[in-house]
Image: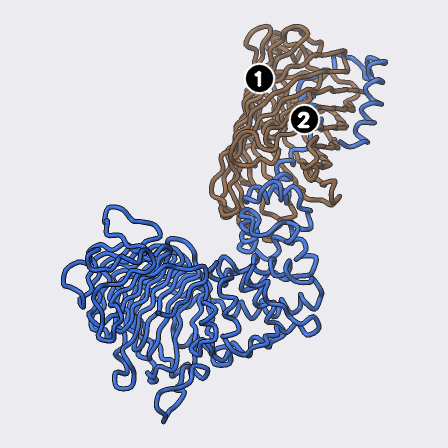
Chain colours: A brown, B blue
């Protein structure tokens, strides 16, 4: 996997040889597969040129991104609150609807761009950031799933041209269940991704993103077999559309995520997860966005050495409403 | 929902609405690639899938634990459930799923400090639930569990696998006997009515010793209906001397399921049981002095190849018992006991309780086969009474089932046969030739007789191509019987020289007697 990561990293960094900058909302395929709500930052209107010239780079004739930022520092503080229906919160095999519940996520996040510099044919922006999320279930019997999640990351975003961009990053995540207030799960996740965005017409843009990463996990394994049973490599492919309807932006997306586990009783386990999502964003003002989201997940798992303990196939659908606040400095 | 989240939302949202913009709106800075970074950071952690999978409650549900139980399970309990490995966890899961014990009972067992690493989870949990929960009780239970674990291993009846048998009389005086009985009941060793049967056992509150006022089987016979469901001995038979055997004369070799799949020979002389009561006597020992040895399988007894159990003592002063707490299956096998009396029994109460198929069973003395469900016999030859013709009378065959005896092509080749006794709610006998010497008593629920091969009459004795060679070489018909006294009093017209009918049909009573009358 290290060799693969190195190769992809090299490819992503040299993609500027043939690429130009293009806008697009990164659709983290992994995120999309797991989180059915995507609180996104206000987007540039695909039909409206921005002063950075990066919206429709090909129209400007620019062959490489142009560094226009003066300070090189940017800061964002976000808050998202969303309430949604989850048909299968335990991700159990069998029917689509099992122990269905309402889920309330509240997320606070801060992101800092810590400079901008040119590297070859690309403009690179390093980011550091973090978030804290509380997840609560409306069904009392599911309170055992209530949790607080923390995430921190460092990434380098490279914009090239002609719609190409890449990311190299490292995530750290941990989850503490509120019942025990002890760390139940943690992982570090180095990854690289390559993204291509394009305009279909003056109201519609599309983006495809390939991500490859690995997760080095530590979980409180129930059977005490290994705390690394959830270590895995991941490859995801996402394609999303963004359709500007004026006040509302409609964003359907599809993500295919492949997970290959490598440790202990999960050695050889493979999961294929499909996620089909539809989201509608309505900007109440420049800082506040209201959105609706619905998504369907279907996981097909094989190779587990713990087949006696049930399989990891499941399907679920989520749908609900969210409100996001974006503050930028 | 968490209160703090609600409060934060309430604080932040009005603030946003009142201020409109909290950040600088500058399209020149609106790099959408940056926006995607912001977007990614504002969603819940991607670790949530791993967290879901590692959640103990999720693991329980995925493994098949009912959600109602899983959702009530604390993380600590879930981890205790898994602390003894996957196989034990699956036992727990099955127990909860099948309603064999409740989550509350399981948690009580954990709270009591019970170690589930050895022994049947179900039996341990049930034993704790039936005990007083004291530390001393748990300690005794663990000791009994260790004993049960060492005893109840799968067996092929090999000589080396059996150590010194346990003496029933000594077991009854052991301080852990009460817990051992509870454990064995959890294993299902006492059949479907085990709970009720066990409720009759009351240990001393101080010593926990199961105090049996008697030292003989005769005073335990009243408990028999609890075991069988309803059937026991008639009051007038309870004092019969043949039912009076000293508990100290009963030995037990317990094991888990017994499977004999290859030609096997087992020596009781080597095991040291069922020695002769009188080595130089007249071979007429008192019943109270006679010996019983039991090979007790907690589980199925399955025999699919030849089994020979030898005993140099062939006097009719003992009985060898092959007992199963579940099913008995004897198929394509010759079973020979060179001693005298042999008994085979199953506590399972289903239609598969006992199967004797394409087999031959040879007992030196009498033979008894009993089932608490259905006794199925097909193409089987029974040979009795040939071990000691010089010193004993011809011998008997006793077949008993709670529900049904279904016997087809049952033969008695070479038997030195005296009595044949069969009892069940319904007897369905086909293609059977009773020897001319056999005094046959057939007892069904109603004591009626039917000869209709196309319809089995429940509660009746159904005969189809059944002959008694002392009566006729032809199949029996109603014409061979005196039906004038009605159901329950049907005798064959043909009688032995002593005046006894060669065949009798009788009805069961609520409490029946197993003795021929």
Whether B137 is drawn above or below B311: the answer is above
Question: Which chain letter matches label 1?
Answer: A
Does dot 2 land on a helix, a strand or a loop?
helix
Identify the residue at horizontal 23%, vertical 73% (top origin). Answer: B415
In the rendered image, the quadrant that contains the C terminus of chain A is top right
Most distant residue in the bottom direction: B280
Q: Nearer the viewer, residue A312 or B176?
A: B176
What is the C-alpha distance between the residues marked 2 and 1?
17 Å
The residue under label 2 is B40
Give the side of residue B365 with respect to residue A73, left or right: left
Q: Is residue B394 above or below residue A286?
A: below
Q: Position of residue B507 (x, y in %)?
A: 36, 59
User: Which secondary structure, mark 1?
Assistant: strand
Residue B486 vs residue B95, the one in the foreground? B486
State the quadrant of the N terminus of chain A: top right
Residue B447: horizontal and vertical position, in percent?
A: 34, 57
Crowd around label 1: few <14 · some 14–19 · many ≥20 (10 Å): some
- In the displayed structure image, the side of residue A201 where residue B342 appears, left or right: left
Residue beneath the point at 74% across and 24% down: A81
Front-lying residue, B178 or B20: B178
Q: Nearer the viewer, mark 2 or mark 1?
A: 1
Location of residue B465 by image quarter: bottom left
Does the image show residue A15?
yes
The reply to whether the C-beta atoms of the residues labelled 2 and 1 are less than 8 Å apart is no
Report the label total: 2
> Label 1: which residue?
A252
């Amino acid at each position: 996997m290290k060799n693969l990561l190195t190769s992809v990293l090299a490819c992503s960094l040299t993609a500027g040889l043939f690429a130009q900058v293009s806008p697009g909302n990164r659709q983290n395929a992994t995120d999309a597969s797991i989180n059915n709500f995507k609180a996104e930052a206000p987007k540039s209107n695909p039909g409206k040129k921005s002063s950075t010239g990066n919206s429709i780079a090909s129209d400007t004739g620019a062959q490489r991104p142009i560094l226009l930022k003066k300070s090189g520092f940017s800061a964002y503080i976000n808050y998202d609150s969303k309430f949604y229906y989850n048909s299968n919160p335990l991700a159990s095999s069998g029917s689509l609807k099992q122990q269905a519940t309402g889920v309330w996520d509240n997320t606070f996040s801060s992101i800092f761009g810590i400079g901008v510099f040119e590297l070859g044919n690309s403009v690179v922006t390093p980011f550091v950031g973090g978030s804290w999320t509380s997840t609560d279930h409306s069904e009392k019997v599911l309170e055992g799933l209530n949790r607080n999640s923390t995430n921190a990351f460092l990434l380098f975003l490279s914009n090239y041209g002609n719609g190409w961009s890449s990311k190299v990053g490292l995530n750290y995540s941990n989850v503490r269940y509120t019942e025990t207030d002890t760390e139940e799960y943690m992982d570090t996740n180095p990854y690289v991704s390559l993204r291509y965005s394009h305009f279909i017409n003056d109201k519609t843009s599309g983006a495809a993103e390939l991500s490859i990463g690995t997760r080095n996990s530590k979980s409180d394994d129930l059977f005490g077999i290994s705390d690394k049973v959830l270590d895995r490599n991941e490859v995801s492919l996402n394609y999303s559309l963004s359709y500007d309807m004026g006040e509302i932006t409609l964003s359907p997306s599809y993500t295919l995520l492949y997970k290959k586990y490598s440790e202990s009783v999960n050695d050889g386990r493979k999961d294929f997860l499909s996620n089909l999502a539809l989201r509608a964003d309505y900007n109440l003002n420049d800082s506040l966005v209201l959105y609706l989201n619905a998504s369907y997940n279907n996981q097909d798992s094989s190779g587990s050495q713990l087949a006696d303990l049930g399989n990891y196939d499941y399907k679920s659908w989520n749908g609900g409403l969210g409100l996001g606040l974006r503050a930028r400095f | 929902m968490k209160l703090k989240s609600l409060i934060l939302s309430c604080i932040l949202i009005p603030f946003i609405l009142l201020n409109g913009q909290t950040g600088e709106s500058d399209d020149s800075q609106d790099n959408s690639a940056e926006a995607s970074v912001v977007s990614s950071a504002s969603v819940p952690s991607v670790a949530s899938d791993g967290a879901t999978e590692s959640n103990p409650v999720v693991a329980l549900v995925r493994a098949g634990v009912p959600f109602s139980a899983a959702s009530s399970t604390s993380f600590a309990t879930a981890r205790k459930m898994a602390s003894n490995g996957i196989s034990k966890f699956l036992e727990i899961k099955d127990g909860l799923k099948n309603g064999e014990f409740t989550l509350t009972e399981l948690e009580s067992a954990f709270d009591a400090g019970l170690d589930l690493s050895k022994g049947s989870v179900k039996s341990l949990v049930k034993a704790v639930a039936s005990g007083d929960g004291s530390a001393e009780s748990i300690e005794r239970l663990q000791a009994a569990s260790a004993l049960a674990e060492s005893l109840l291993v799968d067996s092929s009846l090999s000589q080396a696998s059996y150590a010194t048998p346990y003496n029933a009389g000594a077991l009854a005086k052991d301080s852990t006997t009460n817990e051992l009985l509870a454990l064995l009941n959890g294993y299902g060793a006492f059949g479907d009515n085990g709970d009720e049967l066990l409720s009759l056992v009351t240990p001393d509150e101080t010593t926990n010793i199961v105090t049996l006022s008697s030292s003989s089987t005769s005073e335990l016979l009243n408990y028999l209906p609890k075991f069988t469901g309803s059937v026991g001995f008639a009051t007038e038979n309870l004092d019969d001397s043949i039912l009076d055997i000293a508990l100290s004369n009963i030995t037990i070799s317990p094991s888990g399921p017994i499977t004999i799949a290859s030609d096997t020979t087992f020596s009781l002389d080597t095991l040291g049981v069922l020695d002769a009561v009188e080595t130089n006597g007249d071979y007429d020992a008192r019943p109270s002095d006679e010996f019983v040895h039991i090979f007790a399988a907690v589980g199925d007894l399955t025999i699919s190849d030849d089994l020979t159990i030898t005993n140099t003592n062939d006097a009719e002063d003992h009985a060898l018992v092959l007992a199963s707490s579940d099913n008995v299956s004897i198929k394509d096998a010759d079973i020979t006991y060179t001693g005298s009396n042999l008994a085979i029994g199953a506590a399972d109460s289903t239609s598969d309780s006992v199967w004797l198929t394409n087999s031959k069973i040879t007992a030196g003395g009498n033979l008894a086969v009993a089932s608490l469900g259905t006794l199925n016999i097909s193409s089987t030859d029974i040979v009795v009474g040939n071990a000691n013709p010089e010193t004993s009378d011809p011998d008997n065959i006793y077949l008993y089932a709670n529900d049904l005896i279904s016997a087809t092509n049952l033969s008695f080749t070479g038997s030195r046969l005296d009595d044949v006794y069969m009892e069940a709610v319904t007897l369905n006998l086909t293609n059977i030739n009773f020897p001319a010497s056999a005094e046959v008593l057939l007892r069904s629920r109603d004591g009626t007789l039917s000869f209709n091969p196309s319809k089995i009459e429940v509660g009746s004795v159904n005969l189809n191509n059944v002959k008694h060679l002392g009566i006729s070489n032809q199949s029996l018909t109603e014409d061979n019987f005196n039906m004038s006294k009605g159901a329950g009093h049907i005798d064959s017209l043909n009688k032995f020289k002593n005046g006894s009918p060669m065949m009798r049909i009788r009805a069961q009573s609520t409490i029946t007697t197993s003795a021929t009358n």
